[in-house]
Amino acid sequence: MIRVAAVGDVHLGEDAGGRLRPALDHLPEHADVLLLAGDLTRHGTPAEARVVAEEFRDVGVPVFTVLGNHDYHDDAVPEVGQILENAGIHVLEGDTAVVPVNGLTLGVAGVKGFGGGFAGKCGSAFGEPEMKAFVGHTVEIADKLRSALDSLDCDAKVALTHYAPVPETLAGEPPEIFPFLGAYQLGEAIDASGTRLALHGHAHLGSEKGETPGGVPVRNVAQPVIRKAFSVYCLEPDG
């Protein structure tokens, strides 16, 4: 069995150091890996990233993250990413990692994702160049996720995004903003790749549990949703 701890949307500011650390000090008792679903900072500044780095440094298990829209806000993504990497927090954006766990292997593929909406209520790459660019960006990121998941050779695959791949985990948010909270293309990538679990954040008023059209469990691990330092999901190997 593989135990996956996950949380997103912790939104740590410069004044938030130590907020999660007491729970994280006992993380290896509960989980084999920690996945962070983006929006680690409030405004994406390097100073905030340093707080995040100290909070999640040396927690006793491998740590992987994607960045969220808040982490992009200060236009300092390369510096933010390097600060996290220097602390042993591995940033995924179209990348993968394979972690050995109890004689098994866990594969993680991560992208930030983007908006666009869901089947029947979504944007399309038609009309103005701005709209084509918006939807084109979503498609490009979803393709990166699909390629990353396809490349994994492991016992269990997990997809890690910030934006949602299904609408079910957005329930509770105003329907008018669903197109800015996720995109169906992410769900299609997950369904095409033999994924066992999909994790995301972003939707603070959403719901924890959903499922892709292909039956892959989806979990919204935004901290305002799970209301704790992290949730743990257990995976058995394929077969």
Image: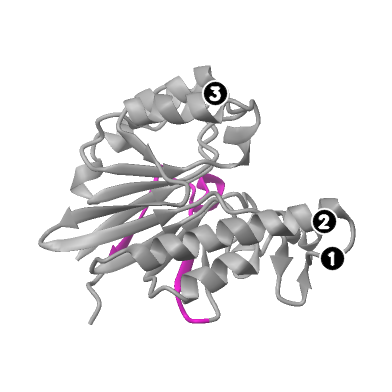
- Left or right: 166 with respect to 57? right
Please, what is the three-letter code of the amino acid marked with disc 1?
A: Phe
Residue occupying the point 45% across, 63% down? 147
**Distance between the Cα atoms at labels 1 and 3?**
39 Å
Q: What kind of element bears circle 2?
A: helix
Q: In which quarter of the image is the N terminus?
A: bottom left
Q: Are circles 2 and 1 on residues that touch, CB within 8 Å?
A: yes
Residue 44 point in image, percent of width and height: 58, 28
Residue identified by numbered label 2 = 131
Is residue 166 shown to the viewer in this render?
no
Q: Distance between the residues labelled 2 and 3?
A: 33 Å
Q: Which amino acid does label 3 sit on?
A: Gly
| Figure check: 184 above or below 99 | below
Task: Tell me where residue 186 appears, x and y as whole percent.
Answer: 57, 65
- What range of the chain is rendered magenta? 214-234
Please determine whether, in this image, residue 58 is positioned above or below residue 181: above
The residue shown at (62%, 52%) is: 203
Q: Is mark 1 on a helix, strand or loop?
A: loop
